[in-house]
Amino acid sequence: MLLIKRRYLIILLIFAVCLSSALFIINSDGYKSQLKQIGYHNLQRLKSVENDDVIRVYRANSEILQIVASEGYNGDIIILVSIKEDKITMVDILDHDETEDYGGYIVEEWFLNRLCLPIDNELNTVKMKKVKSNDVVAVTGATISSNAVVDGVNKCIKNYGGLRDE
Amino acid sequence: MNKKTMRLLALFLILIMVLPFAACASNKQETSALQYQGNLKIVSANETIEIPFNDIYKMESVTRNVNSVTSSGEEVSNEVLGVLLSSVLSENGIKQEELNSIRLVAGDGYAIDVPTEIVTEKEIILAYEFDGNPLKEKKQPLRAAIDDVRSMYFVSNLTKIELNPIAEDNVDESISKAIILETEAKQIELHEYTYYENVDKAIKVTELFGKYKVKEDGSSEFVAEENFTKTEKNEVLGTGYFKITGENSPLFISPDLPKGMHVKNFLTLSSDDIVFVSAKQMINYLPTRQVNGVTGAKLEEVVDSIHMNSDYYTLTSLDGYKVEVTKDSLEHGIISVNDEGLYKVSFDSTMPKSASVKDIHTISVGTGEKAIAPTAESDKSNDTKSKENESALWTITFEGLEDGIFDFTSDKAERKLELVELDTQITKNDKEVSDSWNGYRVLDVLAFLKVTEFDSLVMTSNDGFEMEYTKDEIDDTTIFAVMKNDEMIKEDTLVRLVQDSQFASKWLKGICKVTVK
């Protein structure tokens, strides 16, 4: 009888460990470690300005780093946007599932560099040629994916406005 | 905790563990169900038939193994399950084998014409399963599948089929005029087009078609490498551009069309009796020969590839210089390109030098009135001339002299005149270019020919191009250059007029005649 009870207790213990591990993984900040891998340290999370779209906001010295989820052609694209002194200084794609020959090009440096613009106005996707200073030329043949990235960056610009007012 | 509670707890734990799997299984069942709201539109000249996709799924299905070749040349094999288009059509009183061509249209705007030979000879399957799996959401409700064709015909998200949308007669086999796109690009307005990381130059199709009066409601046929052919409606082409610089050029591209409808590296685009030709692609893909040490596409192959059948051809340069040649002469000619991107038609020694055309812009069907042929006469005159000037590298014929015509040769220049050096620095494509030249002062040559007074000199190059220089433009720094940077100038462009000027716009190459006025 005692043996059976002990068996149940062991099962319960294993369950408790699994559950707490799962909860820890869910609540742990995987993005923070990802940012550290990129080279960002001394990250201060600003939970109060996070929302459904902008899922993480950090202050890293004088930079504001925002991680935003934006819906692409094949699901969410996770974008890291760094803003410093009213200018987008860096955009990186942390995760995506876009088609290699089409939207897959959004990870290319030449496309991401196009997004590094002042944040006076929201960015605008164009298809062929940059005319206005806030225009971002989409990746050829991948307008949906490009739009998703630009939308994501725009959400960060908007959110940065709120953060600045605080 | 009693035994019963323990058991309940264990059961609860098992249930928690099993539930997610059960949820996954139920999701899978949902996606595999063949249900799709909406209708397949079949559009003919007279009517539009709408067939619910769910009805198509219920029709008698077929399973076929189909092979296709992707745009990157990869061969793909699939087992597809679907309904034959012929069955769908026959239920509506239409026979597939009696159709000319069809146009498959996807929900995202992608569209492609399936040519008559495929429509009449092959099974077209409206597939809803590939390799045992239902189509992914974005490819639903149907995907076309045809055995042994290019994958561009495997239209996903197929929502509309247009029957016989193009009168095949529109693609005229008898071409009367060919426009060289690369040369045309020097004349027509170019637009900037961002293509991936580069900003390239492009011709707006409507502007090109407007200039050459290509019918807006017609259709055109692309021919690209590896015998790729594709027919497209002119109204669709009108939404786009022909990118003529950079990667994959010439490339038909449109900001409003799916990438799959772009046509890269095309050789020709023909519409009615006109064809737009990429000389660059002709040189890359057609058989070549060497003429005067220069390699280029065989002229007869060029004319053959554009289906221009005539006994005479008129070659026209961008500046309007025209030469008519016979069909036989094509076998002695080439289209080549030089380092500056200038396309030229040139012939071997069986044809006079005047038959060569620099900046070749058009090739059209000739009348035969002034056609130059590679006759024995022409050979003989060349032979006579070459004997006369056996040791001469070059000859400039001076006309308008008091005592008539004089052939000024390299031998005479070497013996009688001083070879001078001239260093130049010009602006070319916004860059400073420095060169060192050796040659003979034009004024020294005129003095040698006892020309004391003149108003202007008209110089003619070996492709017939003429340029006039006023007396003021000819000074001590104007030379007939024969060497550039210590190397002899290529035979083809010898002798070259060079001046100490900022731009090289009046530096005429291949001078063979000077008329003193």
Image (cartoon, coloured by chain):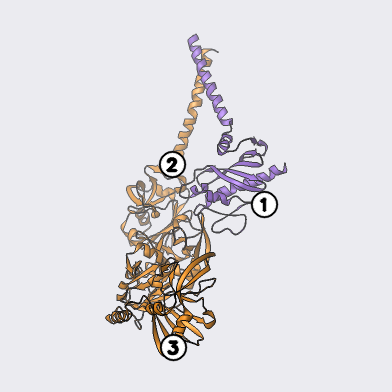
* Mark drawn on residue A120: 1
Q: Residues within 10 Å of mark 2 (few under 14, many from 20)?
A: few
Chain letter of the purple region: A
Q: Is residue B214 left or right of residue A39?
A: left
Q: Distance from label 3 to label 1 (Cα)?
A: 72 Å
To the question of a shared chain for discs 3 and 1, the answer is no
Hey, what amino acid is under mark 2? Ala
Q: Is residue B332 left or right of residue B183?
A: left
Which of discs 3 and 2 lies nearer the camera? The answer is 3
* Mark drawn on residue B205: none
Q: Disc 2: which chain?
A: B
What residue is rendered at 35% in x and 83% in y? B369
Q: Disc 3: which chain?
A: B
Where in the figure is residue B20, as x and y percent of width and height? 49, 30
Where in the figure is residue A113, as x and y percent of width and height? 56, 50
What residue is rendered at 45% in x and 41% in y? B31
Q: In the image shown, does B483 or B465 lie closer to the viewer?
A: B483
Q: Can residue B424 be seen at all in this image of the molecule?
A: yes
Hey, what amino acid is under mark 3? Leu
Where in the figure is residue B390, as x and y percent of width and height? 31, 78
User: Considering the numbered disc 1 on the image, is that residue within a helix, a strand or a loop?
Assistant: loop
| Chain B painted colour | orange
Residue under numbered circle 2: B33
Residue under numbered circle 3: B401
Hey, what amino acid is under mark 1? Asp
